[in-house]
Image: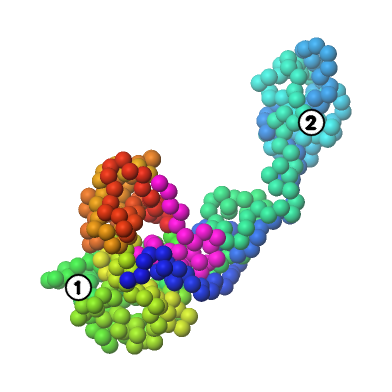
């Protein structure tokens, strides 16, 4: 068995990033930026008011308070700034351009208006309530680097840069093949000894969350020729192939020999982790193959740990690996040393609560968990109160 770090290193070795495509801002949510976005103009593009009030020149406030200035002109959003003749005050609204010659804004709550005059009780300082041109970004500055995954904030910034389209990495195409005589589609008529298939649905959702496009193949029975045909079809046109089940050493575990018959070059098929020891990795031509275990928890955990980083690397994501944190363990967590453990848990602020049912066939633990507690391979576990390493599960 390979240890986790060596296995992950092999999965990510030699990854050739996918091509690029240009999409509209509305289509770019969750995509990975494939170009540097720079500011063609300063942001903000001009000096403007951060408050409703009066634009003034701070140098006009000499002598003793109070000060009375005539109100001349009005600056509104979406219109050019009016002329400004000192000494005076210009009515101004939030977001409106600052008139040339003014250098401060006094909030309207701090001004007494009497007809065409404005009375001030305190002198403003230069720059007060003013947002300067280029305060966020100077012209030519990099706003977003290549490899940035685009969320709401990044898309808002791209729109502020006046970009209607973005160059992004192509979505990885991911085939998902679930095998086993016992499987039937969820919602179909039960038959003796059957179970509803859940891995394909869960993995498809995880693929989408990681930026890929899933292609769920029809369920395949435990037959060597049927498995080989299904594999050959699932490989075609996909960048990554996920197989689920059939990679262990039982008499009905047919996926591994079928992969070899299809021309796959398998790099490894066992990793020293729990859950998820029977994990295969290899390739068929340019298609990467991950052979996941069949138990629901094992399939989802191994895909989160190996498949998600692979999909992110294919998209040139700057951060393909999950970001671990630390939390205080609320209850004891024990294991037999020998394999690195990933235990389902729930985060509660700075604490993490391990779930009681850690069985690899329990889909409830994946549905109720939002984190994985990591227990090193040489450890027998931790007592309550220990500080442990934690992976936020759905932020992987």
Q: Residue at x 31, y 50 (%)?
A: 345
Where is residue 71 drawn, in percent x and y? 80, 23
Position of residue 366 in the picture relative to residue 81 (left or right):
left
Position of residue 38 in the picture relative to residue 275 (left or right):
right
Quadrant where the image shows the C terminus: bottom left
Residue 214 in which image quadrant: bottom left
For label 1, the residue is 182
Residue 351 in which image quadrant: top left
Disc assigned to residue 36? none
Is residue 26 visible in this depiction of the protein?
no
Quadrant where the image shows the N terminus: bottom left
Disc 1 crowd rating (10 Å Cα; few below 14, some 14-19, many 20+) is: some
Disc 2 crowd rating (10 Å Cα; few below 14, some 14-19, many 20+) is: many
Per the image, label 1 sits on a secondary structure element best described as loop
Seen in the picture, residue 90 relative to 161 is either above or below; the reply is: above
The magenta stretch spans residue 322: yes
Question: Which range is magenta?
Answer: 302-326
Where is residue 252 drawn, in percent x and y? 21, 79
Where is residue 144 drawn, in percent x and y? 63, 55
CA–CA distance between discs 1 and 2? Answer: 75 Å
Residue 339 in which image quadrant: bottom left
Per the image, label 2 sits on a secondary structure element best described as loop
For label 2, the residue is 103
Q: Residue at the far left: name it.
A: 192
Where is residue 155 drawn, in percent x and y? 58, 53
Q: Earlier in the sequence, mark 1 or mark 2?
A: 2
Q: Residue at x 72, y 25 (%)?
A: 106
Q: Residue at x 57, y 73 (%)?
A: 19
User: Observer-nearest residue: 86 or 395?
Assistant: 395
User: Observer-nearest residue: 233 or 186?
Assistant: 233
User: Observer-nearest residue: 260 or 117?
Assistant: 260
Seen in the picture, residue 43 relative to 37 is either above or below; the reply is: above
């Amino acid at each position: 068995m390979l240890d986790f770090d060596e296995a992950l290193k092999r999965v990510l070795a030699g990854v050739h990033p996918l091509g690029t495509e240009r999409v509209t801002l509305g289509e770019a949510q969750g995509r990975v930026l494939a170009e540097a976005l720079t500011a063609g103009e300063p942001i903000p593009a001009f000096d403007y008011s951060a408050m409703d009030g009066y634009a003034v020149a701070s140098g006009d406030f000499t002598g003793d308070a109070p000060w009375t200035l005539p109100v001349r002109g009005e600056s509104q959003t979406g219109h050019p700034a009016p002329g400004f003749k000192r000494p005076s005050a210009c009515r101004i609204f939030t977001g409106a351009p600052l008139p040339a010659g003014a250098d401060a804004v006094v909030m309207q709550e701090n001004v007494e208006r009497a007809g065409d005059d404005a009375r001030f009780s305190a002198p403003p300082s230069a720059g007060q309530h003013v947002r300067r041109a280029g305060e966020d970004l100077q012209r030519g500055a990099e706003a977003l680097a290549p490899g940035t995954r685009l969320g709401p904030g990044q898309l808002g910034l791209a729109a502020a840069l006046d970009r209607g389209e973005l160059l992004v990495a192509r979505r990885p195409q991911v085939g998902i093949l679930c095998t086993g005589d016992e499987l039937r589609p969820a919602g179909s008529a039960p038959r003796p000894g059957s179970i509803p298939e859940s891995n394909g649905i869960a993995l498809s959702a995880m693929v989408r969350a990681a930026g890929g496009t899933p292609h769920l193949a029809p369920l395949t029975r435990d037959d060597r020729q049927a498995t080989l045909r299904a594999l050959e079809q699932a490989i075609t046109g996909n960048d990554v192939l996920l197989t689920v089940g059939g990679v262990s050493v039982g008499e009905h575990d047919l996926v591994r020999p079928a992969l070899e018959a299809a021309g796959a070059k398998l790099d490894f098929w066992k990793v020293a982790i729990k859950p998820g020891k029977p994990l295969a990795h290899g390739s068929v031509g340019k298609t990467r193959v991950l052979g996941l275990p069949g138990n629901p928890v094992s399939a989802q955990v191994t895909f989160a740990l190996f498949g998600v980083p692979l999909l992110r690397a294919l998209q040139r994501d700057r951060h393909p690996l999950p970001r671990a944190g630390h939390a205080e363990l609320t209850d004891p967590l024990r294991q037999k040393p020998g394999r690195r453990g990933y235990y389902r848990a729930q985060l509660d602020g700075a604490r993490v609560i391990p779930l009681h049912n850690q069985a690899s066939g329990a889909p409830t633990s994946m549905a109720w968990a939002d984190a994985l507690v990591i227990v090193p391979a040489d450890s027998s576990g931790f007592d309550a109160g220990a500080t442990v390493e934690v992976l936020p599960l759905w932020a992987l």
